Each structure stands twice: as structure tokens, then as C-alpha cells.
Amino acid sequence: MMFDTVLIANRGEIALRIIRTLREMGIRSVAVHSDADAGARHVREADVALRLGGGYLDADRILEAAAASGAQAVHPGYGFLAENTAFARRCAEAGLVFIGPPPSAIEAMGDKIRAKATVSAAGVPVVPGGAEPGDDLIDAAGRIGFPALIKPSAGGGGKGMVLVRAAAELPEALDSARRTAAAAFGDATLLIERYVDNPRHIEIQVLADAHGNVVHLGERECSLQRRHQKIIEEAPSPLLDAAARAAMGAAAVEAARSVGYVGAGTVEFIVEGASGDYYFMEMNTRLQVEHPVTELVTGLDLVELQIRVAAGEPLPFTQDEVRLRGHAVEARVYAEDPSRGFLPTGGRILALREPGDVRVDSSLMAGGVIGSDYDPMLSKVIAWGPDRASALRRLDGALAATTVLGVPTNIAFLRALVTHPRVAAGELDTGLVERHLDALVPHEAVPADVLAAAALVLHRERVPAAPADPWEVPDGWRLGEAAWTTWRLESRDGVAEVLVRGLPGSAAGAEVRLPADREAVRASLSGDGDELLVTLGGTRRRYAVARDGDTVWLGRDGNAWALTRHHLGDPGDRAGASGTGDGVVRSPMPGTVLVVKVTAGERVAEGQPLLIVEAMKMEHTVTAPVDGVIAELPARAGQAVDMDAVLAVVRRDGEA
């Protein structure tokens, strides 16, 4: 019997994605929320919303909320509790249907060590390696050789995975991986595998019902990754032909059958670039973040199929009836700063535009705050085309039409990746992004037209648009001639001076003199609200604009720039103010101090690791900026810190 009420034990775009299908099926949706998410979109759009208080991992409160709402089933989304065996069992004990696989299947595939043994017995090829607790990982690494890959046994999503290229790196890498595994999954057990050179990451979507039917829905190429985190996914893979697809699909179906799987799941394979040989990596016993590309090429709603299978219905099609049509590509938009090593970012969204001609799975809204409580992924932009080239072009255009002001994002990086020649040719592997980072993350100064646009915005706000008594205009003024106003605009690239003066008899017209120009350039500004048209030297460009105090945010073609009106007396003072080049050690992101590796009074060398800061499930090692002695050490393990908070002060040798 179909459910009439389903509680969603998740948040953000995941919850919104499930709400959309529930609404189409005529099923009442129940959202739950932490205090941090009280004003979130999924809370507003659900039919019912209940407060949990602390967070999304409190099973007791979720089950209480399900009982209070009258829900018959719980959908865990594709994170948080989706692969939690104990939670799935507790749902059953409470008389609730868990919309996911049976606990036994979660348990079998959730432990990577046990999963490899299970699927290997079913004839599915696996990567050579060793595992705890029955194997010493240092000895195992010696057997399989280097490079080797360390993985949390209970993990997923690339968290805690560490690539080790030499034996000397192994002890520290094991310590780091254990810390991450224990913090993220509550289980510090690790395994180590032979690292496959030039690998491609290809996963197969499977569906199984309670009547013994198991099918696959083709593959997704997920090779474009950074630090083992997927960035761009597509379906189908440009690597596989029909025969390879059938073989890998059959292996995935056998893997699912081997554990009595029911529901939607993903079997992940690593494919050796040179030989084409493939090996089982793991099975994610849940819906994946990248499932929309499969939906676009199959025409199926995977969430609806999950719900129908959980309600006891058989799959409505056979393997022979699955058809793949066209090509789909998905890009993940993150709150991160590629120019600063992809550190997580945060802040208030001042202005937002998302494309309307492609699929966007998003929970963003103007005025929303992006903090460090959850994963930094903000949204997914997914484009379909009749072929791969057209799908990539549509995705690039959709990213260009995406604007997020107030929070630095990776959108410009995604556009550079989507249009990279190797990507266009389908020549992918999991190391491509790291090898081409210099081209994908160019460190360029703020464009001159952006500096001019920011100066014009400030100038228009300072000088009244309507004709005014010249004695009331706050510029210098001489009879018959407007005076120049100097705007000192600060960005991460430094401070630039832009001169602006109005044209007589024109409210919108002005002249602009940029730092490298001797001649003034005629300019004009039109538009209102969060969109402006700026004409500079005969070229007109459209910008999204937002103000945050003294900072002007400008967006164009997927790029965003923050320019702050500069108050310091000398641009060179900025280095000392930000700590660049001195001994002040600041937090590179908002987060939590995980480890403090030094003590006050200790002598350190430039580049020596001092602390580890964790934010949004990512560790970042903070190093000493100079040689010297730790003079101050205000940071403590477990302490929450803001971006740029002082963590330590290193006194240079010879300084008082």
C-alpha cells in the first residue's frame, strides 16, 4: 500500500528534491530541521516542518518527529543517515518503512572490507589490498607496493582517503585517515589498496525490488575529481561501448544480488586507463548526489521508484526495456575559493540568479547564510543534450548564467573545467584536475572593467542623480569643471585606485581613469536594483551587483568579485594588516581547531605544520609563515574559530 505521509531525514537540496517527487505523487512531506536550518527553503516548502533542535543525526528525535507527524515511512535522502544500519533497524522497530535497502545489505556493503570479500565470492573483480583488523597495513603496503590508497572501511564520498606514494609517508597518512574516519563515520578502521594509475571512476546505477528483480540503468562517469571528491559527472561515459556497459552492468547486478539488495544503489568501479580492466571499489547503499544525470538520460524518477519499491511494488520495467537517450552532465557548485586552495567559504547570499532552462537542484535563496555546519555543496546544475558536445555547451552556458554574490564559489573554475580540451575530448581520469590546476584556476588580477564598474557604483551613490547645488556635491568643485573622485578599491590582489568624475548635465555619464591609463575613458551606468549595465569605452557589459557595507560585489559570466572601499593610508599597509609575510598565523576558513601540533615557546621553521583546522568535513594544515619561536598560541583543540582568527604568533629570530 502506498504511503500518504513521508518524513525526510535530511536537509537542503536533498530534501527539496524528495519533496518535489512526493508532491507529484500526492504524498504529504514532513521536513525536520536543526536550529541552524530554521529558515531554510526545505523547511518552508514541506507540507509539515518539525524542529529537531541539535542536528540531523539524532535518531531519537527523528523517530519522535515521525510519530508526531503520522508518517508511515522515512526517506533518509543521500547523506546523514542514509547508510546507517542502526537507524534503518530502529525505523523498522518503530513500525516505519525505511525507504532504502534492508539493514543487512547496508551492513554488508557499508564495511568495505566485508563488501570486497562478498562481491569477490560472487565473481566481481576487486582491487588487490589489505585491511584491518586482520592485516597490518604497513605490511600490506609492502606487499602491494606504492603508490597505495588508504580508505576508511566505513566511509564514503572520498572522506578520509589518502594517497601515499612512499613508505615514509605511510605512518602520518594512517594517523590522518584514522582521525577523519573516526570523526566522520564513528569507525577508525582502515583498508589499503593498490593505487590504479590513470584511473577512471565509473559507477553503475542499480535498482532492485522485493520480488527478486534487479536491473541497472547504465553508468555515470565520475572521473573529474579533486581530493577524491566528485566535481562533474556525466551519463553515459564517453569511455564505454555497448559491450563494456553490459559487462559492468552485469557485474553491478551480481554485486547487488550478493547481499539481497532492495532499492536504489550505486556500484562503483575503478577502471584502469591503459588496459580497460575494471575493479569493484564499493557500493553506496543509497541514492547518489549525481543521480540526476541518470534521470535525464533514462526519463525515470529514481526517488519515485525508491518509494514505490519501499511500498512493496515490483519494478515496472525489465532490463531490456531500459533505454539511454542523449547525454547529461552535472556540475557541483561549492562554497569554496579555488584561488586559496579550494578552502571552504561562507557568508550571507546578497544576490542570487540561477538558470531557468536547465535542471538546477538547489536550496539557495537570497539572504540565506552559508555557515560551516554542513557540507559546502550549494547546488547542482545539470544539462541535457542530444549528444555530449551539446550537453557540455549547455552546461557551460547555464554556469555562466549562475550568479552567487556574497559567498565565494567555484563557478568560474567549473566553467574552465567544462571547456578544457581534454574534457571536451572525453580523455578523462581522476588526476586530470590536479595536473591542470594552473590553467583551471588562473591567478589573475581583477579586470579593469570590473574596477571601473565598482567605482561607478560608489560614485553614483555619493553624487545625487538629480541636478544639485554644486556646493552640496561632496567632490572638489571648480566653476565649469567637475573634480575627480579617487576610489581606492581593495581586493585579494591588492589595492587599486580608480578616478571618476561626472559629465556636466548627465546623471549617468562619467569619465573613468584606471590605474594603467593616462587617458580618461567615457563611461555610463544604467539599471537599478541588483542588475546594472555598464558602458566603458564603447563596450557594454551586464553585471549583477550587491552591496555589503563598504564592499561592492559584482558578478558576470559566472565570475564574482568583491571590492572594498579602502580606508588605509597606504596600500602597502595592507600586508601588515592581513598578516601576510609576518608571524601572525590566521585561520584560513571558519571551522574547528582539530589538532595543535606545537606549544608556546617552541622553535619552528617556515612551512612547519602548526595546527589542523577542520571545516565542512575537510582538514586543512596551517603552517608557520616564518622561522622563529611560538610567542602566542591562543588556539586550542576543539575550539571553533572564524575565518582570519589568530591561531598563533611566531616571533621572528631577532625580534623583541
Image (tube, grey):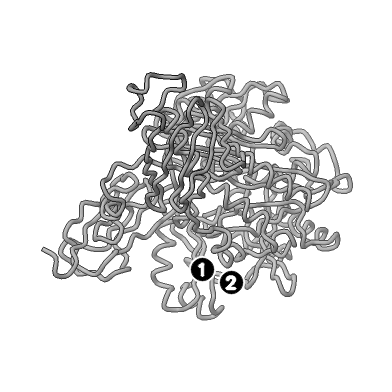
| Residue type highlighted by circle 1 | Leu
Residue 333 picture location, percent across and down: 57, 45
Q: Quadrant of residue 379?
A: top right
Return the residue nearer the eye: 60 or 601: 601
Q: Which residue is mark 2?
A: 195
In the image, 563: left or right of 331? left
- Residue visible at 59% across and 19% down in the picture: 47
Q: How many marks?
A: 2
Q: Quadrant of residue 468?
A: top left
Q: Looking at the image, which residue sits at the far right?
A: 320
SS type, badge 2: loop
Q: Position of residue 466 (x, y in %)?
A: 46, 19
**Camera-side residue: 359 or 441?**
441
- Tell me which label, 2 or 1, sits earlier in the chain: 1
Kindly report the distance in space between the C-alpha atoms of the residues bearing marks 2 and 1: 8 Å
Amino acid type, residue under disc 2 in the picture: Tyr
Residue 418: percent from the left, percent from the top?
A: 66, 54
Q: For mark 1, does the 10 Å Cα neighbourhood hold few (<14), some (14 to 19), or many (20 or more) residues?
A: many
Pointer 2 with pointer 1, Cβ within 8 A: yes
